[in-house]
Amino acid sequence: MADVEPIFSAVSSNAHHLYTLLQCIGFVPKATVHITPDGIRISVEESRVIQGLAFLDKALFTSYTFNPPAASNNISRDSEGDDTSPDATYNPCFVISLSALLETLKIFGTNDPSNTGANKAISAQPSNLSSSNAFTTPALLFDRSCTLQYFQNGSPLSITLSETGVKTTCELTTYEPDGGEVDIPLQRDAIIMKVIMRSAWLHNAVAELGATNPNVLKISASAIQEPFFSLSGSGGPFSESSIEFSIEEQNQDNGASSQSRKLLTDDGTSRSRAKRAKLAPTVTETFLVSPPSSMGSRIKQDYRFSLIQKASRAMAVANKVSIRGDRQGVLSLQFMIEFDTNGPSGTGGGARPSGGGLEPTVTFVDFRFVPLLDDESAADEGGAGGFD
């Protein structure tokens, strides 16, 4: 296929960035790949109750070439057999072995030295480059490139890793999608909860709750009543545990508006109510909770804890997380991951100047979870009481 112009070709000077993103969704062996003009969309799902999506933005690559093929007859013809658009193109879609792709990217030592996520600063946030040495992962990635190519429909996905003249090429078999994968729908026009916070806070909370080996994760949020935002684990062999993201008393006093202070003089009760309506947990950047009238003043939803844990690696490497929930209970965890395009592990090839330099490349990994029904939650809890 050397003489055939590929449909898609992209070169990355840092395969570790690709590995980091793909490992976030590496909880199943196979993935569906969509090649688009703006990047590569890689999605996975399990039993239609959890879905993971990683988007490899074209900004992650030093070069990105996409020559979309013309649509085949069965795609470009409508139901009556007429050509709807002779020049129509489409974005290739195929299934690959995600575990094989991850193993391929590990050839040059891009594997995570541990599964705990403790080394996330090495891969995604190289803010302390002075601590690197010749044996750390960033140092092992100098002068290396990764080339991805897809030549034509049905051809393998070719991955070429090169280092100082030495090339290693792997070809991964591609499969036709069976149509069984369906996106878990998130009703964006019916979002009733949106919380943005540092991902490390969520990662630490889930890890802490995981110590009791619970079956169910309970999320509780209220805009007017404490606890404003809490996570609880229940149903395991040990006692139930709960983590509350509270408001520091000091911040409550300092954050009171001038109108609230005036209300304090006139009517202490009114002042408290006015101030509380604007309060949010200290660790959150955005805290919007608007439950429907059927839920009262508090949103409460249950999810299988083992599924939430599958997003732990993304929690570990991300900078921020957006926690969203809609009326039907679907939970979305959207993680923002920044890669430094300067410095040894980025594409810039030098330390970032204190007064400028390239902005870090921002990428996203999205997880969606289907909630537990009442009877499923009760079965997983083993008859345990509800969470208040």
Image (spheres, rainbow, N blue to C red):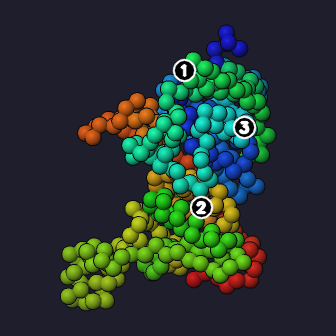
Q: Residue at x 72, y 48 (%)?
A: 28
Which tag is nearer the camera, tag 2 or tag 3?
A: 3
The kind of residue on which mark 1 rests is Thr
Quarter of the image with the C terminus in it: bottom right
The residues tagged by marks 1 and 2 sit, at their Cα atoms, a distance apart of 46 Å
The residue closer to the viewer here, 177 or 156, is: 156
Which tag is nearer the camera, tag 3 or tag 1?
A: 1
Q: Is residue 33 visible?
A: no
Q: Is residue 73 above or below residue 176?
A: above
> Where does label 2 land, which residue?
331
Q: Residue at x 48, y 36 (%)?
A: 134
Q: Is residue 333 visible?
A: yes
The kind of residue on which mark 2 rests is Leu
For marks 1 and 2, the one nearer the N-term is: 1
* Left-right relation of 192 to 234: left
Q: Is residue 48 above or below residue 381?
A: above
* Left-right relation of 331 to 377: left
* Left-right relation of 278 to 219: left
Where residue 107 appears, as percent x and y from the top left, is 65, 33
Task: Determine contact: label 1, label 2, CB under 8 Å.
Answer: no
Quarter of the image with the N terminus in it: top right
Disc number for residue 164: 1
> Where does label 3 land, which residue?
100
The kind of residue on which mark 3 rests is Ala
Residue that lies at the very extreme toward the front in this rendered image: 134
